[in-house]
Structures are given as structure tokens and as C-alpha cells.
Image (spheres, rainbow, N blue to C red):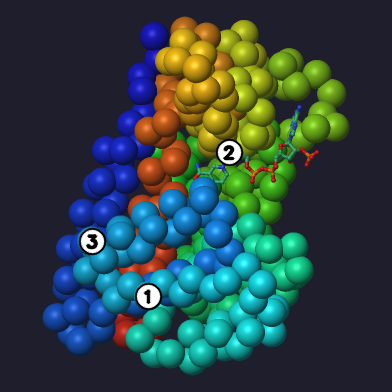
Amino acid sequence: MADIIDGKTIAEDVIARVKQEAATLAGSGVKPGLAVVIVGEDPASQVYVASKSRRAKECGFHSVQHSLPADTPEDALVALIGELNADPAIHGILVQLPLPGHIDAGRIIQTIAPGKDVDGFHFINVGKLGTGETASAFVPCTPAGAMLMLERVRGRDLSGLNAVVVGRSNIVGKPMANLLLAANATVTIAHSRTKDLPALARTADILVAAVGRPEMIRGDWVKPGATVIDVGINRVAAPEKGEGKTRLVGDVAYAEASANAGAITPVPGGVGPMTIAMLMANTLTSAFRAAGREPPA
Ligand code: NDP
């Protein structure tokens, strides 16, 4: 059976370090500040935003939440981001996605100052990651967290290893592939047009699933001994728990895959908790940079 890569424990380690480093920085007069902006009432987004703000407070950050009505005009949101860009007490700005349909999310992301773009979605940060300038980039939180989990199992240098990333989104798949490449893995990105995905997946020493399809990746797609990172979070019906009940599953058929993998991330309790922890780490990094100090490794 595969070793379980416990995201909860690793995320708690990250948070503990962030808290400690934030206290050090506060000693020199700078308190990391995170502004979270949410537009509308989407219940899942409300839950994410509340936990981001709670974690920020727990880390000793200056934490600000802006909750705007669903009919907020795009220009009003742009104006708010402009204020936050100019506010020296704010080091990280996060606009919760998805935004209501009348707002151009692309424009909003590009409005955030690259130096405060702790989600790592601004073109400047995307470009830095793509050109290997990872030291000064903000790396998107989910793939950054997935890399940290991978590091625990495989170390920092992935030379000689084949990695297959299933999914090519700008938020997960592409940045994940760039991070794996920067760590010297030989990387293939698969997507909905890929031919014979099971055969390709079986070549992977490191298999990353970021698809959004419950348990699509079956056990016999996993090479014996491979490290499997399951980014997927899917809510499915769980009639065994009672009528109308649901449970969370990943993009990987966990029980089957565990029989073949060397190590695997569970869902829940895998990559999920890492995302918020990395958001805190990115905000801390931004505050160190603003203070003219070298961010902690
Ligand atoms: P997207 O929907 O943006 O991207 C999904 C990708 O999967 C696309 O590239 C798509 O290919 C590919 N895909 C879809 N169907 C298939 C298929 N049958 N075979 C091969 N590839 C396929 O999703 P995200 O990247 O935003 O998210 C992926 C998953 O990760 C979701 O479950 C999401 O909930 C989860 N997630 C988890 C986070 C966390 O904190 N742990 C954070 C962000 C996301 P194509 O491009 O060709 O359409």
C-alpha cells in the first residue's frame, strides 16, 4: 500500500513557520497584510474566503475582507483594487474567483499590482514562472502546495523522473508543469484531447491529476511505485451516508491507485489544505520584500 502524503500536517507545518516569521517581521515594524475581495453570494466562495481570512488572523496578519454585492460594477471593483494596490498596509490582494458574469475576471486579475498578486495569476508572475524566475515570482498557491508535498517524498531535484500532469488550466495544470520542469523533471501535459491517456499515465513516476472529474484516473493507470498528487476536489452523492448526503472525492480512484502507487495524496486532507497555507506563505514573502528583507526560504 502507498504511503499517504498528509496535506493537513504539512499545511500546519507551513502555517506554524509563517506565524513565527510574521512575528519576527512584526518586531521590525511590518505586519503582513492580506486583503480578500469577494463579489456576490456564492456559498462555496463564502466558505473559502472565510477560511482564508481566519487563517490570516491566526498567522498574526492584518486581515481585511471586502464583501461586495453581486451587482457591483466592474469599474467599482477596479477602483477598490487600485486603493488596495496603493495601501502600504496591504501586501497581498486576493480576488475570489469565479466573479459574476458581468465582470471580466481577466481584466481584474491584471489590475492587481504584480508585487501584491499572491495568487500568482498576473501575467508578470506567470511570465516569471514560465521563464524560471521563480525566486521573484508569486507561484499559484495550489501547485506550489502540491510541489511542497512532492518534495517531502521525492526531494527537490526530480532529475531523471517522468512527470505527467493531467489538466492544463492556468490555475493548476500549467503552473504545476512549469514547477516540475524547474525541478528538472521530464514533463508531459495531458488534457481532454490527449490520446490513450491511461498508457501515458503509466509512464509517470510523478502523476498529477487536475481534471475535475471524480475518480477518472484508475488504479491500473498508475505505474508501480509512482507518486500520485490528486488536486481534484469533487462532490459526489453518498447514498451510503443517507439520503441526499454527499462526500468529497479526488480525480483519482484512491483505493485502487493506493495499491499501485508508492505515495499518494488523499482527498480530502491532501492538496486542499495546502492551498490556503501557501497563500499565507506568499503574503509573508510579499511583506518581507516590502520591508526590503530577504524572504524566508
Ligand atoms: P479546469 O476545469 O480549469 O481544467 C480541467 C482540465 O482537465 C482541462 O485542461 C481539461 O482539458 C482537462 N480534462 C477534462 N476532462 C478530461 C479528460 N477526460 N481527460 C483528460 N483531461 C481532461 O479545472 P482546474 O484546473 O481549475 O481544477 C482541476 C481540479 O482541481 C478540480 O477538481 C478543482 O476542483 C480542483 N482544484 C483544487 C484546488 C485545491 O485547492 N486543492 C484548487 C483549484 C482547483 P481541456 O483543457 O482540453 O479542456
* In the rendered image, the vertical position of residue 219 relative to residue 167, given as above or below: above
For marks 3 and 2, give the CA distance: 36 Å
The quadrant holding residue 215 is top right
Q: Where is residue 82 in the image (x, y as percent from the top left)?
A: 57, 88
Choose between 247 and 123: the one closer to the eye. Answer: 247
Q: Position of residue 51 (x, y in %)?
A: 37, 55
The quadrant holding residue 279 is bottom left
Badge 3 density bin: few <14, some 14–19, many ≥20, Cα 10 Å: some
User: Amino acid under label 1?
Assistant: Val
For the C terminus, which image quadrant? bottom left
| Residue in view at x 26 percent, y 66 percent | 57
Q: Earlier in the sequence, mark 3 or mark 2?
A: 3
User: Amino acid under label 2?
Assistant: Ala
| Residue in view at x 42 percent, y 22 percent | 263
Q: Earlier in the sequence, mark 2 or mark 1?
A: 1
Q: Mark 3 or mark 1: which is in front?
A: 1
Residue placed under numbered mark 2 in the picture:
185
| Mark 2: C-beta under 8 Å from nearest atom of ligand 1 | no
For marks 2 and 1, give the CA distance: 39 Å
| Mark 3: C-beta under 8 Å from nearest atom of ligand 1 | no
